Amino acid sequence: MTPMLKYTFSIAFLCIAFFANAQSGPIDVSPKDTIQKTEAYGVRVGIDLSKILTTSLDDNYTGLEIVGDYRISQNLYLAAELGNEKKTTEEDTYNFTTSGSYIKAGVDYNTYENWFGMTNIINLGGRIGVSSFSQTLNEYSIYSSNRYFYPDDYASGSITTAQEFDGRSAVWLEVVMGAKVELFANIYLGASVRIGALVSNKEDDDFPNLWIPGFNKVTDNTIFGASYNYTVSYLIPLYKKKKKVREKYVDEGDKERKENSEGGPPQN
């Protein structure tokens, strides 16, 4: 046997041995149970539509709120709201105007497991809110059975000289429940309900804080209040991260093939 032929037989023998050894183990022809998918991370900013609508319909109210969040992990977001409100409240014996600004800051946690390509949110969260504002008592009435001793401008029992009480402030904690749905690429429509509890309420005996920007109406003998918003926002993508998502089997046949390739279903 020539050296060349001997060398060729040796190579063939090694190849046969290699492939025989490779075929001795099971061949996994089932689809992989995980795939890689990238998701956008960035800043989402928007406005509260409810305040814009109320401003256009109610002559006694003017308000604007800017909302935003920043995604820091798979389901956790830093969130904030910044706003300014002016509202005139009319009661039976008096009316007053509240004007001021507020900021709320906290976190949201997304409890919704999205399908591929979806980035919707059903969130639970919390905020700490801080408001700085003034109260102006525009008009109030004094009831008396004898008007004789009142000056002429008090003859009707109504005092129209405005009294301003500035330097007011309030701090509260807020529980947030809401949702955001992606209508178009990076454009979201959202809504939320908030239950707040006053922690600090700076006022005096001359005139109490009956309405607080960002907190809304203050009710006697309770520290709790409620508010809501409807928002439209835009996501500014800054970068992407890979997300490991478990692939679902499309039918029982795929599941059976997977179990057979792994030696059968797990035993109880």
Image (cartoon, helix red, strand yellow):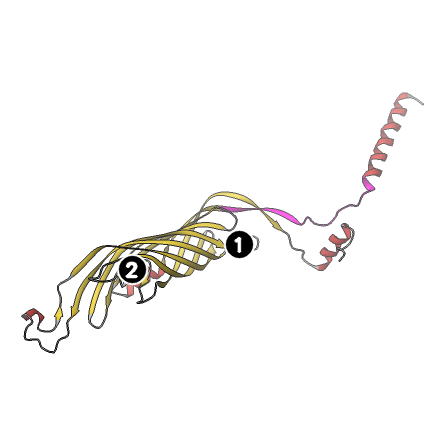
| Residue 135 x %, y % | 22, 59
Say whether residue 101 is left or right of residue 188: left
Query: Is residue 32 or residue 135 the one in the foreground?
Result: 135
Location of residue 51 by image quarter: bottom left
In the picture provided, is 16 more to the left or to the right than 234? right
Dot 1: what SS? loop
Circle nearer the N terminus (1, 2): 1
140 vs 9, nearest the viewer:
140
Verify whether residue 122 appears in magenta: no
Give the residue at x 20% y 58%: 165
What amino acid is found at the position of numbered circle 2 in the picture? Ile
Q: Residues within 10 Å of mark 2 (few under 14, many from 20)?
A: many
Q: Residue at x 53, y 57 (%)?
A: 112
Residue 28 part of the magenta segment: yes
The x, y position of residue 265, in whole percent, is: 76, 55
Residue located at (76% from left, 50% from top): 262
Crowd tier of the residue under label 1, counting other residues whose Cα lies within 10 Å: few below 14, some 14–19, many 20 or above: few
**How far from the left and from the top, in percent, is residue 198?**
34, 59
Q: Which mark is residue 118?
A: 1
Quarter in which the C terminus is drawn: bottom right
User: Residues in magenta?
Assistant: 22-40
Relative side of 225 to 263, left or right: left
Q: Is residue 142 above or below residue 184?
A: below
Find disc 2 in the rendering and name its residue.
212
| CA–CA distance in space, label 1 to label 2 | 37 Å
Counting from the top left corner in percent of width and height, residue 116 is at 57, 53
**SS of the residue under disc 2:** strand
Q: Nearer the viewer, residue 119 or 100?
A: 100
